[in-house]
Image (cartoon, grey):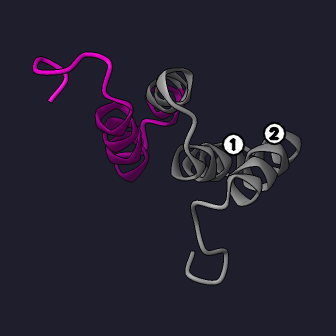
Amino acid sequence: ALELDPRSERAYRCLGDNDISRGRLDAAIEHLTRANALQEHGLSHWSLAVVYERKGDDARAVVHYRRALDLGQIDANAR
């Protein structure tokens, strides 16, 4: 997907989510941060929050959980 559109927020978000599932948390941060730089999205922030929570950085996790909810693109009850 990135070969077709290197500015695809969704492609970077999917890479980040894949990194999370494989336990590659630093790579996930890189991909999800890139996704948000291209186009901020609640799901990217939510995934970043999950990563930071797993890394024990609760302060950063809270920032990203709040931003995800503020953007209104996710249902907090569904996650």
Magenta span includes 28: yes
The magenta segment is 1-29
Quarter of the N terminus within the rendering: top left
Task: Tell me which label, 1 or 2, sits earlier in the chain.
Answer: 1
Q: Which residue is mark 2?
A: 60
Question: In the rendered structure, which amino acid carries the disc numbered 1?
Answer: Tyr
Question: Helix, strand or loop at disc 2?
Answer: helix
Question: In the rendered structure, which amino acid carries the disc numbered 2?
Answer: Arg
- Residue 21 is left or right of residue 69, and the answer is left
Q: Is residue 12 above or below residue 30?
A: below
**Mark 1 to mark 2: distance in Å?**
6 Å
Q: Is residue 32 above or below residue 41?
A: above
Q: Which residue is mark 1?
A: 52
* Type of secondary structure dominating the magenta stretch: helix
Q: Residue at x 65, y 50 (%)?
A: 54
Q: Is residue 47 above or below residue 77?
A: above
Q: Residue at x 51, y 36 (%)?
A: 25
| Residue 72 occupies quadrant | bottom right
Quarter of the C terminus within the rendering: bottom right
Q: Residue furthest left?
A: 4
Q: Nearer the viewer, residue 24 or 7?
A: 7
Could you say which disc has been placed on residue 75 in the image?
A: none
Question: Helix, strand or loop at disc 1?
Answer: helix
Q: Residue at x 57, y 35 (%)?
A: 40
| Residue 55 occupies quadrant | top right
Q: Mark 1 touching mark 2, by CB under 8 A?
A: yes
